[in-house]
Image (cartoon, rainbow, N blue to C red):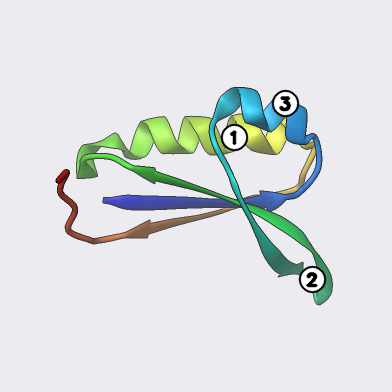
């Protein structure tokens, strides 16, 4: 399972301590802003861990909400 957590691109130093990152552009309530997209590949049964991480990101960035996507996918290590 691929999980994505979308958050505001602030407090980068604190977020780097939580995980590696990729940047993008996002919108919240029709306002454009810089986004940070955190991608995590885990077994399907790890929803609770991802929600816990998303809540930590939300609290760290003092945000009203963060978006979490759960995307079915196939992955393998070569």
- Residue toward you, 77 or 30: 77
Question: Residue at image x 75%, y 47%?
Answer: 64
* Image location (x, y in percent) of residue 62: 80, 37
Residue on which disc 3 sits: 14
Q: Residue 20 sits in which quadrant?
A: top right
Q: Is residue 47 above or below residue 15?
A: below
Residue on which disc 2 sits: 29
Disc 2 from disc 3: Cα separation: 25 Å
Are the two marked residues, 2 and 1, in contact with CB atoms closer than 8 angstroms? Answer: no
Q: Tell which residue pokes out farthest to the front in this image.
A: 78
Q: Counting residues from the N terminus, which is met first, the one under dot 2 or under dot 1?
A: 2
Q: Is residue 31 above or below residue 6?
A: below
Question: Residue at image x 37%, y 33%?
Answer: 48
Q: Is residue 31 above or below residue 67?
A: below
Mark 2, Cα crowd under 10 Å, few <14 / some 14-19 / many 20+, is few
**Lateral position of residue 78 relative to residue 30, left or right:** left
Disc 2 from disc 1: Cα separation: 20 Å
């Amino acid at each position: 399972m691929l999980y994505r957590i979308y958050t505001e691109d602030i407090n980068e130093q604190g977020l780097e301590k939580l995980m590696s990152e990729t940047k993008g552009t996002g919108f919240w309530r029709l306002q454009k802003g810089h986004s940070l997209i955190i991608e995590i590949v885990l077994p399907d049964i790890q929803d609770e861990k991802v929600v816990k991480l998303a809540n930590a990101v939300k609290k760290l960035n003092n945000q009203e909400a963060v978006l979490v996507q759960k995307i079915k996918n196939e992955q393998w290590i070569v």
